[in-house]
Image (cartoon, rainbow, N blue to C red):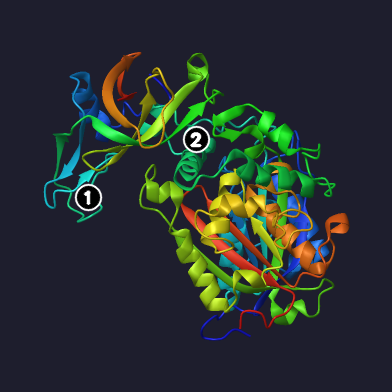
C-alpha cells in the first residue's frame, strides 16, 4: 500500500468500492441534499451526519493543473513528469486527479472525462482531456 | 495607548531580536536552536531569563520545540506559557500582544527552532496523513501553489516574466544580506532558463530547507522605554482563517485574505501607501503575488503588471522582503521577516538599510489555511 493513498481510512472505503466497479461517487447529505468531496463525517452545510454515497456524472472542467518534473516521494520517481488537475465536477464538487497524457497539454477550462485506473491495487480517478 | 477601535496600538513593542546562523546546524536539536536564539534575543533586549514572565514556543514543522521542551532548557517556570502549531511568527506575536494587553504577562519570549535540513525532513510526505490529493500525486506545498498560479495566469494573463520578478527581486535584496543562504546573482534570463520544478513554478520560486533558530522579545510600551533598543511598536494585528477544507478555489486563491486586510486597515486607520517596508512570508513566490493583491498594494489580478514595474525591488517605492525572504535568505518559516522588519525600523540593516522607514508590515499564512498580518512602527502613536 502507498503512503500517499488513504486506502485504510474508513470514510474512504465506499469510494474505493464503487471506483473498482467504474463508478464515480461522492457523498450526499440526506438532510439538505448538499454534495461533498472529499469525504467528511458530517455535512458542513447543515451539520447532519445522515449521508449516502451517490453516483455523479464522470465529467467536469479543468479548474487548474500542475506538471511535476520532480518526484517528492520515492514512489513517484518512475512517474515524472506527471500532471495533476483540480477538476470542477459538473455535479459541483472539486476533485483532484491525475491527467492522462494526451495529444496536447491540458489548459484551464478544458472539458475532462473521468476514467478509473488501477495501480498497485488502488483504483483512482484519472482525467482524460475531452 | 490603544483606543477602543484598536486596543493594541502602541501598547506593546518588540525590543529584542536573536537568531542563529541559518543553513546547516548538524547535531543541534530544534530546542537547542530555539534556546540559542532566545538567549541572544534577551541579551539584545538588555534582559535575562529572570526578566521573563511569558514564553510562547512555536513548534517546528516536525513537531519539536514546544513550550515544555524549550522551557526545560531555559530553566524557567513562568506565569504565561504557550505552544503554537502555527508558524510565521505572526501568530506568536499576536498571542504575545494579547497576553500583554490582557495583563497576563509583561515580557514574553517568542521562540522558533528548526533542524529540517540536517534531519533531512521529507517535505513530500503528506503532513496530516494521506488524502485523495496526495494519492493523485499532489504533494509538497509547490503543488497547491502551482495550481493557484496556473489559475492566476489563465484568468489574469500573468506571465512568467512578471511572476519571476519576485524571485529575481528577492535575490537582489539577498545580495546585500550577509545572513542570506542564496546570494549568487539571479537575472531574469537565468530565472527563465531554469526548468520548471512543478510547472508553472521553478526552483527559484520555492524556498529552501534550512536549519536555524529565531527569537523575539516582546514587552509593554512602558518597559520598552527603559531598554537599550529603539522599540518597534505594534500598531495593529489581524487574522483570518480559511479552515473550511482544502483543494478548492476558496482555499487556493484565498479571496478571504481581503478580510484580514480589511481588519488591519480599518483598525489602524492606515492604508497601503503608509507602508514604508513590506514583508510577506514566502514559502513560494505565490504568497507574495496573492498578498500584494489582497492587502491592496495593487488590484486583484494586477499583481503581474505591478511586479513588472519594479516597485518591490531595491530602490522601488514598496521594498519587499529586504532580507531576501524565504526564497533567498533562509527558510525559518517566515520568522526572519519579523527580525528584518525590526532591524529596518531600528536602522540596523547595514548595506540594505532603507531611508528611515517608520512603518513596516508583515503578512503571512500557515499553509493555505490561516492568514495573519501585523503592522510595526517606530512611533507608539501609529494605529491609534
Expressed as whole percent of the image width and height from the top left, the position of residue B92 reads 59, 60
Which residue position holds label 2?
B143
Report helix, strand or loop for mark 2: helix
The residue nearer to you, when weighing B362 against B205, is: B205
Nearer the observer, disc 1 or disc 2? Answer: 2
Give the number of the disc on residue B313. none
- Residue B257 in sight in this render: yes
Q: Please tell me how crowded label 1 is: few (under 14), some (14-19), or many (20+) other residues with Cα within 10 Å.
A: many
User: Which residue reaches farthest left?
Assistant: A30
Chain letter of disc 1 in the image: A
Chain letter of disc 2 in the image: B
The residue nearer to you, when weighing A49 against B352, is: B352
Quadrant hosting residue B382: bottom right
Expressed as whole percent of the image width and height from the top left, the position of residue B235 reads 63, 75
Q: Residue at x 60, y 39 (%)?
A: B160
- Spatial CA span between label 1 and label 2: 27 Å
Which residue position holds label 1?
A43
Judge from the rendering whether residue A123 lies leftward or rightward of residue B357; answer left or right: left
Q: Residue at x 68, y 83 (%)?
A: B381
Judge from the rendering whether residue B222 lies leftward or rightward of residue A75; answer left or right: right
| Residue A18 to residue A45: above or below | above
Amino acid at each position: 500500500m502507498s503512503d500517499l493513498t488513504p486506502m485504510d481510512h474508513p470514510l474512504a472505503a465506499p469510494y474505493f468500492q464503487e471506483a473498482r466497479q467504474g463508478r464515480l461517487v461522492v457523498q450526499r447529505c440526506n438532510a439538505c441534499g448538499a454534495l461533498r468531496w472529499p469525504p467528511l463525517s458530517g455535512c458542513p452545510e447543515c451539520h447532519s451526519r445522515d449521508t449516502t454515497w451517490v453516483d455523479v456524472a464522470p465529467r467536469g472542467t479543468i479548474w487548474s493543473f500542475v506538471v511535476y518534473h520532480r518526484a517528492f516521494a520515492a514512489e513517484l520517481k518512475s512517474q515524472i513528469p506527471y500532471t495533476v488537475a483540480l477538476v470542477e465536477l459538473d455535479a459541483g464538487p472539486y476533485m483532484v486527479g491525475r491527467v492522462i497524457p494526451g495529444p496536447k497539454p491540458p489548459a484551464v477550462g478544458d472539458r475532462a472525462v473521468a476514467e478509473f485506473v488501477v495501480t498497485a491495487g488502488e483504483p483512482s480517478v484519472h482525467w482524460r482531456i475531452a | 495607548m490603544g483606543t477602543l477601535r484598536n486596543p493594541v496600538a502602541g501598547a506593546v513593542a518588540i525590543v529584542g531580536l536573536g537568531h542563529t546562523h541559518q543553513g546547516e546546524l548538524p547535531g543541534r536539536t530544534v530546542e537547542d536552536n530555539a534556546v540559542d536564539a532566545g538567549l541572544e534575543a534577551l541579551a539584545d533586549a538588555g534582559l535575562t531569563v529572570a526578566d521573563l514572565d511569558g514564553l510562547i514556543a512555536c513548534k517546528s514543522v516536525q513537531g519539536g520545540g514546544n513550550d515544555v521542551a524549550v522551557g526545560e532548557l531555559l530553566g524557567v517556570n513562568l506565569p504565561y506559557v504557550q505552544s503554537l502549531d502555527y508558524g510565521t511568527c505572526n501568530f506568536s506575536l499576536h498571542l504575545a500582544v494579547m497576553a500583554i494587553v490582557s495583563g497576563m504577562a509583561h515580557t514574553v519570549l517568542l521562540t522558533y527552532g528548526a533542524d529540517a535540513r540536517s534531519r533531512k525532513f521529507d517535505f513530500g510526505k503528506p503532513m496530516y496523513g494521506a488524502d485523495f490529493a496526495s494519492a493523485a500525486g499532489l504533494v509538497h506545498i509547490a503543488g497547491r501553489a502551482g495550481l493557484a498560479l496556473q489559475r492566476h495566469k489563465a484568468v489574469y494573463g500573468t506571465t512568467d516574466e512578471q511572476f519571476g520578478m519576485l524571485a529575481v527581486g528577492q535575490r537582489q535584496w539577498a545580495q546585500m544580506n550577509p545572513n542570506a543562504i542564496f546570494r549568487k546573482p539571479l537575472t531574469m534570463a537565468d530565472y527563465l532558463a531554469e526548468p520548471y520544478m512543478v510547472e508553472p513554478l521553478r526552483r527559484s520560486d520555492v524556498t529552501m530547507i534550512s536549519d536555524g533558530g529565531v527569537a523575539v522579545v516582546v514587552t509593554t510600551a512602558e518597559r520598552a522605554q527603559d531598554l537599550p533598543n529603539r522599540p518597534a511598536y505594534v500598531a495593529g494585528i489581524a487574522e483570518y482563517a480559511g479552515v473550511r477544507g482544502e483543494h478548492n478555489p476558496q482555499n487556493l486563491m484565498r479571496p478571504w485574505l481581503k478580510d484580514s486586510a480589511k481588519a488591519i486597515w480599518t483598525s489602524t486607520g492606515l492604508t497601503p501607501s503608509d507602508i514604508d517596508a513590506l514583508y510577506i512570508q514566502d514559502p513560494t513566490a505565490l504568497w507574495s503575488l496573492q498578498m500584494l493583491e489582497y492587502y491592496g498594494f495593487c488590484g486583484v489580478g494586477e499583481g503581474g503588471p505591478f511586479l513588472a514595474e519594479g516597485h518591490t525591488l531595491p530602490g522601488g517605492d514598496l521594498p519587499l522582503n529586504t532580507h531576501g525572504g524565504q526564497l533567498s535568505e533562509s527558510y525559518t518559516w517566515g520568522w526572519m521577516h519579523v527580525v528584518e522588519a525590526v532591524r529596518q525600523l531600528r536602522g540596523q540593516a547595514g548595506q540594505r538599510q532603507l531611508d528611515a522607514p517608520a512603518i513596516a508590515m508583515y503578512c503571512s499564512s500557515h499553509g493555505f489555511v490561516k492568514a495573519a498580518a501585523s503592522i510595526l512602527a517606530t512611533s507608539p502613536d501609529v494605529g491609534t
